[in-house]
Amino acid sequence: MTIVVKGGSVVGTNGVDSADVLVENDVIIKVGKNLTGDITLDASGCHIFPGFVDLHAHLREPGREDTETIETASRAGAKGGYTALIAMPNTNPAHDSVTVIEFVREQGRKAGLLDVFPSGCITMGRQGEALAPLAELSAAGVRIFTDDGSGVQDPVLMGRAMQYAISLGVTMAQHCEVSALTQGAVMNECGCSSDMGVPGWPAIAEEMMVQRDIEMSRITGASVHFLHLSTARSVDLVRDAKAEGLNVTAEVTPHHLSLTQELLTTFDPVYKVNPPLRSMKDIQALKVGLLDGTIDAVATDHAPHARRDKELTLDQAPPGMIGLETALGVVLSAVDLDPVQIAAVMSRNPARIAQITEQHGHNIGVGDIAHLCVVDLGATWQVDPSKLASKSRNTPFVGRQLRGMVRSTMYRGQITVQDGVAQK
Ligand code: DOR
């Protein structure tokens, strides 16, 4: 049986070409004009991208299946145009054993809506005290390690992890937060936080760890990825490190590109995230960094939370917002990216950083596994919370007008989403 994705513009590394894409089983067998197949997936007026890859998704299984499961997150991801997710390790139990890694991978396989690649913990239980069995986890296929949710505070431990990164050929991804500087913090440290009388999360708490890990990457040569950068100075530090040729990469979230600290003056915990929303100046610097290639990727930091938890007071509520289904729309509403740039930051670069290029993030070419998404870049839409596939609803984007809509997604040659509707 063949499927033709018809009437769209195929996005490649150097430009965009009007072409149909013919898929048989799970493989692209032809890209060209006037193709026909047994089934037609309409892409007229749309761009056909390589399937998106999210470097940063909290799937909550095992441990908090009341807020998300690997299946519901996979469906949310497919609706967002994703064909691969990197699962963050702060589950319960955490991703510090081969058993948990295999469980997460297997749940992803069972859902069958996209590829789930579990990250591994850097330290046991993400406690920052002893290294996780990095070699064992790497032998089980883990390519990217992080304690996300918290940063590795101890430089001795982080230095050792980087030595392992070199010998194992894996990447260390850092949540940059010097926790001694962020005790009790609920938002960016700024005029608003003083006026509100709440503890602030200063920019320097992020920048000190970015700087430390750049220095450590210089000494060790390890590949270091900076998660969810949020400050202008962090962008400058990474830009300078890249100019020196150091082995560092970085990501930014849709919310850090589009929302400012002033929203916290409502005291609404839906805006509480870690790192916090920052100033307009920071947003401008993040946008420049994304456009000039300092920041390699957009990553969602999809962080589902139960309503009863997010309805606590600002100091009590956990940080995070969901993002898989709104990522493209939020980013394109904030930053003017052309189709080639979108393919780079949403698919090719994250696949490279996560070391999954054998399957994801390629140009759309004959012989490749068919991971595609069909996007109407001109369409505007509003988030309807009743239509979200995620189990949680903690998003501030409900009711906002977004530009750029994922129409359909294909994963391993199967249509997972058609005209915005999940197919299973
Ligand atoms: O806002 C966040 N939420 N940032 C993190 O680093 C963790 C995440 C979560 O797991 O909820």
Image (cartoon, rainbow, N blue to C red):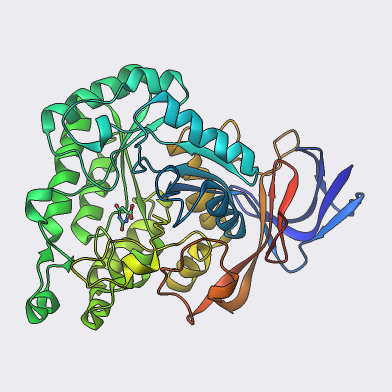
Q: Is residue 154 left or right of residue 25?
A: left
In depth, the one of 373 and 394 nearer the eye is 394
Q: Residue at x 19, y 30 (%)?
A: 158
Q: Is residue 199 left or right of residue 276?
A: left
Please identify the quadrant where the N terminus is shown.
top right
Residue 404 lies, with reference to residue 210, above or below; the image says: below
Across and down, in percent, residue 74 comes to 57, 50
Q: Residue at x 36, y 40 (%)?
A: 89
Quadrant location of residue 80? bottom right
Quadrant location of residue 388? bottom right
Res. 356 in view: no
Across and down, in percent, residue 20 comes to 80, 53
Regarding ligand 1, which quadrant of the image does it lie in?
Answer: bottom left
In depth, the one of 321 and 228 nearer the eye is 321
Q: Residue at x 40, y 74 (%)?
A: 396
In depth, the one of 373 and 68 nearer the eye is 68
Across and down, in percent, residue 360 comes to 58, 39
Q: Residue at x 14, y 79 (%)?
A: 192
Res. 299 in view: yes
Please identify the quadrant where the C terminus is shown.
bottom right
In depth, the one of 369 and 1 nearer the eye is 1
Residue 308 lies, with reference to residue 64, above or below; the image says: below
Across and down, in percent, residue 66 comes to 45, 56
Residue 126 lies, with reference to residue 137, above or below; the image says: below
